[in-house]
Amino acid sequence: MRTDTEHTIYLKDYSPSAYTIESVVLDVRIAPETTRVRAQLTIVPAANTPRGTPLILDGEDLRLEDIAVDGAPLVQLAYAADENGLTLVEPPNRRFVLETLVAIEPEANTRLMGLYRSNGVWCTQCEPEGFRRITYYLDRPDVLATFKVTMSADEELAPVLLANGNLIDKGSLGDGKHYAVWEDPFPKPSYLFALVAGDLASISDSFTTASGRKVDLAIYCEHGKQDQCHWAMDSLKRSMAWDEKRFDREYDLDVFNIVAVSDFNFGAMENKGLNIFNDKLVFARPETATDADYENIERVIAHEYFHNWTGNRITCRDWFQLCLKEGLTVYRDQEFTSDERSRAVKRISDVMKLRSAQFPEDGGPLAHPARPDNYREINNFYTPTVYDKGAEIVRMLATLLGEDGFKKGMDLYFERHDGEATTIEAFLACFAEANDTDLDQFKTWYEQAGTPRIEINEQFDADAHTYTLTLRQNTPPTPGQPDKAALVVPVRFGLLGPNGAEIGYERVTGAEARDDVIVLDKPEVEVVFHGVANRPVPSLLRGFSAPAILETGLSEQDRLFLARHDSDAFNRWQAIQDIGERLVVASVNGESVSDEATEALTQAMAETLAHETLDDAFKALALNLPDEAQIARAIGKSVDPSAIRASRQSLLKQVFGPLADRLEAKYEALTSEAPYTPDAAQSGRRDLRNRLLSLLATVSTKGPELAHRQYQAAKNMTDRFAALAAATLAWTEEAPSLLAEFRTTYAGDPLVFDKWLAVNARAPDDSVVSRLQAILSDPSFPKNNPNRMRALVGSFAMANPAQFTRPDGAGFRFVTGAVLDMDKRNPQVAARLLTGFRTWPMLEDSRQQAALAALHGLRDSGALSRNTNDILTRILD
Ligand code: PHE
Ligand code: ZN
């Protein structure tokens, strides 16, 4: 295994390819053990390419068996093949056809990049650099070619043969073999290539586009699972209709296929016309999938479908531009979910996710800009920063330009760049031109890592009737970026009068305020509101209008006022969370927390619970204290996760204990006999009921019994799993027996097994590490499967802070041990598991020492993959 960590690629070194590939004709002969791929690449030198410039094709784990140029076999000296690829020493100085034949071994491919076999099914994963493991190629996103693919295989092993585009021919080859020919008329980069061959079942449907073209839709899966694909199909049709309505984007091929596979490194992949999915993001039925699973499936189906325009028709020039397609497409899927469900609830959930996944990345050793300017291993840049901060940046653009201005920019982007591989600069230029504005400073969001802090000061002048807000921004240094520039921060706001309604004012002077948005584009700006008779309570960063940390210095009284009156649901939720956060932080710091303070929060929670118009899903999010990781971030340094857990648990009891009867009454009142549907209203109701159960399990003596009862009575997985989680996370007496029962009941379903693994991994008791170790050491544990490993090891590292960071180091060593073992087979998944360590510098000293010991142990344990080495080096730097 190579360990070349020195090789860094820089954005500034980008140059177009000396050769382009116009068209690709592939003949893929699929067979157990050895598959052979014959490729005919029509290659053209770029206009300015000097004669004799070598052609360097990428290739990895390929065995070259034959090579010819324009039909003539190449002599030994004319080419060189090594472990990185194939070089033609002096290619023709004109259009020519390079033909190669390679042998590959999909069954031995445990990295799950290129062509591999999952559960008997041959499938591919090519983004970002997997196509080079199928054939020699210019494996970079700015080389766009049309593809025609002939595939053949044993008729019994692989009755289904799929590739990108439209099916143009199929037939029998005799000898038990058959073939299919697929043609994709849209030029595409190699990372969007896909093929699938296997014995698969399917469901089918169709969608008629706005312009009246009928598209055949199908979802393929292992036999017997067809009945679990209907929600995914329904989500697909709704996504197609939404993209037409909201962005005027129609689908462009005659077929759209989705295939569910059980071994997959990520969630899903947007290959042109042939999306390949991790099966956990396809399969759903009420007995085995939770409401959260249903929502996730809907979101990811939409995401991959939306890539057809933002990603496929318009793709990335190079991998530094990854957030051009990912940030934008996440923004689009967030908008889809907001339109299909509750916008406020979606926004709160997305911000919680941003804070729990992206903020720690941005504030630690793995911080990088949404558009990085260098990388050693691109696979390590499919990160929360690229995806989720990338989406926040697009959202800010929409906030700053307004709905119409944003739409104009998107329209220009689609029109101008269709069929191209482009850049962030080109994207921003469309919005700037369409709105006749300048986005030069705005671009800093893409180039600068770190989460800005925004500090607010307010001043009310009763005589002058002016109310002044001073806003300051500051972004802390990140690795390689010691000095930070001022960003353009849109701060959406409202000013609340004494009765809770928005106040009016005569005029505004000072900084730019567009309607309800203050533009903070300098280190400090001041806004003066004139004609204000009483001090208003400011509601700032409404809807979380920028990915920043807001420090307002508002009093507890003001926050309670916002919690009660803010018309912005996000800030209403935020106000309650802020009150809780301060109480837990004070208690961790050993400061005394007054009874009045906790009573006031109890009162606010009681009002929220009883509120007549707030939706159930909102209440479920509000009736909680910030989680342990959020408290750790608020404290920021010398963090002791066990102390945080202890303080938080005790505050939960103080705040919610007095409400136990009301929580229970509401819990009972929410019981429903209605048949299961996954819609927002019904799932919101379950959310709230299950939130109450989890509170009761912690604060009431009746809780454990209720959890037990709900577990037994549950008619769907949402309620059953919520009961199991409530018992496990409170580590009630029944927890071990419920865990055992759940394991046996669902023994045959790998996706339910993942739920069991993940909830085990989050258990708070001191034996959790040894239990997890025992699970992992069982010889029958499927250690090659990414979902299983992520559920067990990933959940532990990311969601069990107190046990992961145990001062004796057992939690850390469990994770580094698993990473070391996984790294031998699947470096991408191993590297991702290791990112659980990204917050170690925040910990108190003894835990830091224990983390370092485990990380040094990993470093000293021999050859690591480039993926894992890259993460390890950056975490330790
Ligand atoms: N491009 C995929 C998505 O976001 C993610 C992915 C990356 C999947 C790399 C597989 C490999 O939709
Ligand atoms: Zn994506």
Image (cartoon, helix red, strand yellow):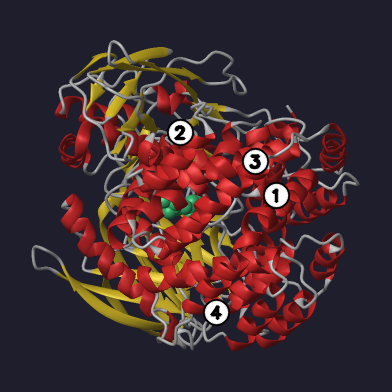
Q: Earlier in the sequence, mark 1 or mark 4?
A: 1
Residue under label 4, please give it. Answer: 717
- Residue 639 position within the rendered picture, expressed as x and y whole percent measured from the top left: 75, 36
> What residue did someone put label 3 on?
583
Numbered label attached to residue 648? 1
Q: CA distance from mark 1 to mark 4?
A: 28 Å
CB of mark 3 within 8 Å of CB of mark 4? no
Up the image or down, 169 lies above or below 425; here it is: below
In this rendering, which labeled residue sits more in front, label 1 or label 4?
1
Q: Residue drawn at (31%, 74%), measured in percent from left and top?
A: 234
Give amino acid for label 3.
Leu
Please, what secondary structure does the residue beneath circle 4 have? helix
The three-letter code of the residue at mark 4 reads Met
Q: CA distance from mark 1 to mark 2?
A: 41 Å
Report the front residue among 144 and 671.
671
Q: Position of residue 95 (x, y in %)?
A: 29, 40
**Which is nearer the N-term, disc 2 or disc 3?**
2
Crowd tier of the residue under label 4, counting other residues whose Cα lies within 10 Å: few below 14, some 14–19, many 20 or above: some
Does the beta carbon of the residue at mark 4 sit less than 8 Å from ligand 1?
no
